[in-house]
Image (cartoon, rainbow, N blue to C red):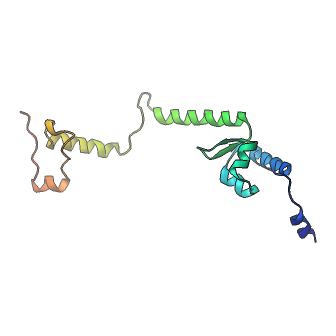
Amino acid sequence: EGAAAAVAVKLTEKDILESVTAYLITNGGQARFGMVGGRFNVKVEWLEEHFIVDRACGLVFVSEDAKKDWDSSRRIKAGDKAWDKDWGQGVTTRRRKHKDMMMKIRTEYVPAKDMGWQRNPRYKEIKKGKWKKVTAS
């Protein structure tokens, strides 16, 4: 009887609001849509009515202060990524070694007048002698 009675009790909107607020507070003031919606069976539209929602990031915030804290941490992370460990390094470039190697091949085998218009030779074409090194003239 106890389990059936518990299921029969319909939660009011106020009960759900208190539960979601408590959940967000225990999770640092924020949570993803899926976590809140799946746990409390609420839609994003309902969350937008009662909480601060950032649809672009998929997050729900319990208060304006929680959103400001999250925004400031995002700015710090973005700044760390941009400046890396060496001051003035700029954004880190992926596959730097490969790009340097391709730039060296380009300067050795592609004439200056054709830079940007003609593709780089492939290793196999260089090995077979289909491309010759550019001589300084």
Q: Position of residue 70 (x, y in %)?
A: 64, 37
Relative placement, left or right, of 71 versus 91 is right
- Say which residue appears at 66% left-offset and 50% top-offset: 33
Q: Quick one: 78 or 32, which is closer to the camera?
A: 32
Q: Quick one: 38 or 47, which is closer to the camera?
A: 47
- Image quadrant where one finds the C terminus: top left
- Say which residue appears at 71% left-offset and 57% top-offset: 38
Q: Position of residue 66 (x, y in %)?
A: 70, 37
Residue 112 to residue 32: above or below: above
Residue 92 to residue 15: above or below: above
Q: Which quadrant of the view contains residue 125?
A: bottom left
- Image quadrant where one finds the N terminus: bottom right
- Residue 77 visible to an observer of this rendering: yes
Residue 95 to residue 127: above or below: above
- Say which residue appears at 76% left-offset and 46% top-offset: 26
User: Quick one: which residue is furthest to the right in this view?
Assistant: 1
Relative placement, left or right, of 28 versus 72 is right
- Residue 27 visible to an observer of this rendering: no
Q: Position of residue 50 (x, y in %)?
A: 76, 43
